[in-house]
């Protein structure tokens, strides 16, 4: 379609939009102008033109003027009180038809009828048609004789057309309002989903940062404490501790770089690493690092390792990591730890226990909450608490071997 053919429609749309805006801003101005226009037209007809269609041209001119004003002036309130306006105009139309004047201004009743169909309940239309047809039938029976039905039928079809037009406009307006409301609700829901996704992503990043920084800093703290005591008696042991601190620090920095790379990489970048992705095969290096930090750890890992989805393997790794980190921080001196992984028929059972005495602040941070959230993502269960003997702490994780994430977590992406 060319620009020449679309320009008139665009101008018409702009004109209609401006008229509607002006009407919404100053409704009294539009109502007053329309009423004045029709009043002038009715008075012009009352000056003599009404006799062209009158059944009784001898009707007094004063009555004709009064009826013309009664059929035009009430239009000013047609949008606010269309039923009342129609009742006043119908009374004037009844006198016009019964007297034989048959004023054409009676057709102005179509305007309040249109607004009744547009804004009022459908049952109001029944009363409106009663008000409209009583004068018409009265005049037709009195003056038209055997052809009365022609006058009644033509008036009825005209009023029905106006009512159907009002119903059509009303239906379209309601449909448009429904679409606007639906679009608004969809926009609100989209904003809520964006906020929920952002909150979920913040929680995921906070959980990863807690696991990475908390564990590595605990290991570095243990190595530093051990190196300080060994520095006086065994410089070689102190040097080994410093080497281990450097190795652990570099690993922590690498993992942090990979995690922060998710924030800077484009969302659709296929090669962007979504998160650090340790697996069950990395448990040995994790346990070795904890041993270097000064915590004796006994491990019982099956060979071969049980098959788990990558996200579930990350969950097991993080739970073991967080449990050993809590042991380093809270179990006290002289504590030992044990890590046991058992492959059951349809699940993997992981148990991490220690022989220390938990401090009063153990279990009050984000670690246990993060472990439970990770387990819940893969339909797993996590129980933790003191051992029955009262000396030591135990964490038990059970995760199904065929587990799938409840909602696709970001750290399950390769």
Image (cartoon, rainbow, N blue to C red):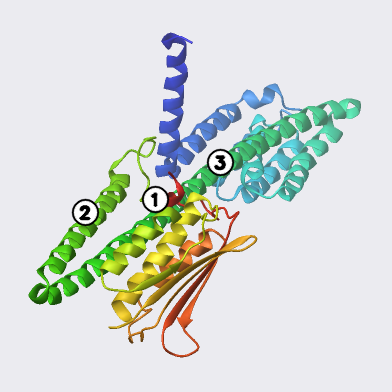
Q: Which residue is mark 1?
A: 277
Mark closer to the observer (1, 2): 2
Residue at the outermost left position: 232
Q: Dot 1, how many residues are within 10 Å of its Cα: few (below 14), some (14-19), or many (20+)? A: many
Q: Which residue is mark 3?
A: 179
Q: Dot 3, how many residues are within 10 Å of its Cα: few (below 14), some (14-19), or many (20+)? A: few
**Residue 245 shown left or right of residue 59 in the figure:** left
Mark closer to the observer (1, 3): 1
**Residue 169 shown left or right of residue 409 in the figure:** right
Q: CA distance from mark 1 to mark 2?
A: 16 Å
Residue at the outermost right position: 146
Q: Position of residue 372 (x, y in %)?
A: 47, 68
Q: Dot 2, how many residues are within 10 Å of its Cα: few (below 14), some (14-19), or many (20+)? A: few
Q: Is residue 34 above or below residue 400?
A: above
Residue at the spot 63% in from the left edge and 51% down from the top edge: 84
Q: Is residue 353 above or below residue 347?
A: below
Front residue (pair 356, 407): 356
Q: Is residue 86 above or below residue 302?
A: above
Front residue (pair 386, 43): 386
Q: Position of residue 3 (x, y in %)?
A: 42, 11
Residue at the spot 41% in from the left edge and 72% down from the top edge: 368
| Mark positioned earlier in the residue sequence (1 or 2) | 2
Q: CA distance from mark 3 to mark 2?
A: 56 Å
Q: Which residue is mark 2?
A: 250
Q: Position of residue 46 (x, y in %)?
A: 60, 30
| Mark positioned earlier in the residue sequence (3 or 2) | 3
**Quadrant location of the C terminus?**
top left
């Amino acid at each position: 379609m060319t620009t020449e053919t679309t320009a008139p429609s665009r101008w018409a749309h702009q004109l209609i939009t401006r008229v509607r805006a002006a009407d919404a801003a100053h409704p009294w101005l539009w109502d007053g102008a329309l009423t004045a226009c029709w009043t002038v037209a009715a008075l012009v007809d009352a000056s003599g033109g009404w006799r062209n269609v009158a059944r009784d041209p001898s009707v007094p001119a004063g009555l004709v003027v009064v009826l013309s004003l009664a059929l035009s002036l009430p239009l000013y309130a047609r949008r606010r009180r269309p039923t009342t306006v129609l009742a006043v105009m119908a009374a004037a139309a009844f006198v016009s038809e019964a007297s034989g004047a048959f004023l054409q201004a009676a057709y102005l009743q179509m305007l309040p009828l249109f607004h009744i169909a547009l804004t009022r309940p459908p049952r109001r239309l029944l009363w409106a048609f009663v008000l409209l047809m009583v004068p018409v039938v009265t005049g037709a029976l009195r003056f038209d004789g055997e052809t009365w039905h022609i006058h009644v039928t033509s008036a009825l079809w005209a009023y029905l057309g106006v009512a159907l037009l009002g119903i059509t406009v009303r239906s379209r307006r309601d449909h448009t309002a429904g679409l606007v409301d639906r679009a608004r609700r969809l926009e609100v829901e989209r904003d809520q989903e964006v906020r929920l996704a952002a909150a979920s992503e913040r929680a995921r990043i906070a959980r990863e940062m807690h696991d990475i920084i908390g564990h590595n800093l605990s290991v570095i703290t243990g190595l530093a404490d051990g190196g300080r005591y060994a520095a006086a008696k065994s410089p070689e042991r102190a040097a080994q501790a410093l080497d281990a601190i450097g190795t652990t620090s570099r690993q922590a920095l690498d993992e942090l770089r990979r995690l922060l790379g998710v924030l800077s990489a484009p969302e659709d970048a296929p090669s962007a690493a979504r998160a650090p992705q340790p697996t069950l095969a990395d448990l040995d290096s994790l346990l070795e690092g904890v041993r270097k930090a000064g915590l004796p750890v006994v491990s019982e890992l099956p060979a071969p390792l049980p098959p788990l989805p990558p996200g579930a393997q990350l969950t097991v790794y993080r739970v073991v990591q967080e449990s050993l980190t809590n042991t380093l921080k809270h179990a006290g001196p002289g504590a030992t730890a044990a890590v046991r992984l058992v492959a059951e028929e349809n699940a993997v059972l992981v148990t991490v226990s220690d022989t220390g005495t938990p401090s009063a602040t153990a279990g009050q941070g984000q670690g246990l909450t993060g472990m439970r959230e990770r387990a819940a993502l893969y339909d797993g269960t996590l129980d933790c608490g003191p051992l029955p003997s009262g000396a030591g702490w135990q964490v038990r994780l059970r995760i199904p071997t065929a587990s799938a994430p409840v909602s696709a977590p970001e750290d399950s992406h390769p």
